[in-house]
Structures are given as structure tokens and as C-alpha cells.
Image (cartoon, rainbow, N blue to C red):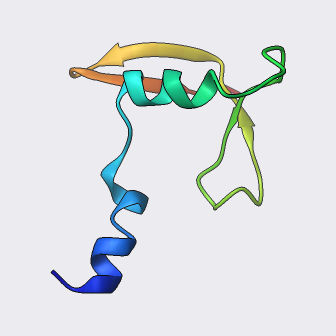
Amino acid sequence: MDKVLKDERWKVAGKTIRQLIVELETFEDKDLVVEISADGGVSGKSISLVGKIDGKCMLIHIE
């Protein structure tokens, strides 16, 4: 596999709920506000709901 593609696979691989929980547990401050970004962190939107849609866990922002 191309080295660049292999090294950047994390960008599109996604995370499971289990992987996300493990990562979140490393945060010392558990009262931080959670936001989601679709532009690499330049801007963020609050997470309004967490739901299961079509067999996937969806973080949902509602304005």
C-alpha cells in the first residue's frame, strides 16, 4: 500500500463508539463542552443529540 495512503488512513477510517470512549476518557476535565467540526477544527457546532440511524451512531447538531 502506498505509504502516504497508509499513514493518512486515520482520516477516513472513522472511530467506533468504543474507540471514542477510550479517547474521551483521557481528558482530565470531563465537563468540557463537546462540539463537532467538519472543517478540521476551524469552526465547531454543538452536539444537540446522539442517535442511532441506519446502524450508525450519529452526533447531530440542530439549529
Q: Nearer the viewer, residue 18 or 46?
A: 18
Task: Please give left or right for residue 5 compared with residue 31 in the image.
Answer: left
Q: Would residue 61 be visible to someone looking at this image?
A: no
Residue 4 in picture, x, y percent from top left: 34, 84
Residue 40 placement: quadrant:
bottom right
**Residue at (51%, 15%) from the top-left corner?**
50
Residue 34 in picture, x, y percent from top left: 73, 27
Task: Please give left or right for residue 10 compared with residue 29 in the image.
Answer: left
Task: Please give left or right for residue 28 compared with residue 51 in the image.
Answer: right
Residue 16 in picture, x, y percent from top left: 35, 30
**Residue at (56%, 31%) from the top-left corner?**
23
- Picture quarter with the C terminus: top right
Residue 19 in picture, x, y percent from top left: 42, 30
Task: Please give left or right for residue 28 compared with residue 36 in the image.
Answer: right
Q: Nearer the viewer, residue 12 or 8?
A: 8
**Residue at (77%, 53%) from the top-left corner?**
43
Residue 9 placement: quadrant:
bottom left
| Figure disc tally | 0
Residue 26 placement: quadrant:
top right
> In the rendered image of this protein, does residue 55 appear above or below residue 14?
above
Q: Nearer the viewer, residue 28 or 60?
A: 28
> In the rendered image of this protein, does residue 34 appear above or below residue 38?
above
Q: Would residue 22 be visible to someone looking at this image?
A: yes
- Picture quarter with the N terminus: bottom left
Q: Nearer the viewer, residue 4 or 38?
A: 4
**Residue at (83%, 14%) from the top-left corner?**
31
